[in-house]
Amino acid sequence: MEGSADGTAESGTRLGLRGHARLIEHHGGSMTWDQADGSFSLEAVIPLHDDAR
């Protein structure tokens, strides 16, 4: 999938990075990213929940 740090994407979920970050944060996690000097880094902490109901 091709996209950019401004939250746009040509295909896929169309959430962009900000939308994915909000979704992850809603579930108690975090996501950060940075783009500088031609490199890109992304870190996501996604909590695992045991929803055995």
Image (cartoon, grey):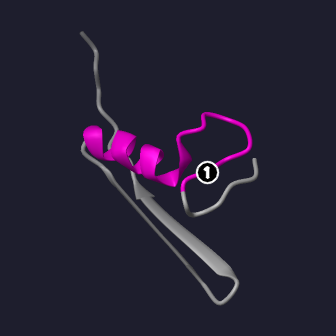
Q: Residue at x 73, y 38 (%)?
A: 11
Q: Residue at x 29, y 46 (%)?
A: 25
Picture quadrant where residue 14 is located? top right
Q: Position of residue 36 (x, y in %)?
A: 59, 85
Q: How many marks?
A: 1
Q: Position of residue 15 (x, y in %)?
A: 53, 40
Amino acid type of the residue that numbered disc 1 sits on in the rendered structure: Thr
Q: Position of residue 4 (x, y in %)?
A: 64, 61
Query: From the viewer's perspective, is residue 38 above or below residue 16?
Result: below
Left or right position of 37 against 27: right
Query: From the viewer's perspective, is residue 21 above or below residue 13?
Result: below
Query: From the viewer's perspective, is residue 43 above or below residue 37?
Result: above
Which is nearer the eye, 37 or 50?
37
Q: Secondary structure at mark 1?
A: loop
Residue 11 shown in magenta = yes
Left or right position of 42 against 40: left
**Placement of the C terminus among the 4 image quadrants:** top left
Q: Residue at x 32, y 44 (%)?
A: 47
- Mark 1, residue position: 8
Query: From the viewer's perspective, is residue 34 above or below residue 36?
Result: above
Left or right position of 8 against 51: right
Residue found at the very far bottom of the displayed protein: 37
Q: Alpha-carbon neighbours of circle 1 within 10 Å: few (<14), some, or many (≥20)?
A: some
Q: Residue at x 52, y 66 (%)?
A: 42
Q: Which residues are magenta?
A: 7-27
Q: Position of residue 44 (x, y in %)?
A: 43, 57
Residue 15 shown in magenta = yes
Which is nearer the eye, 24 or 10?
10
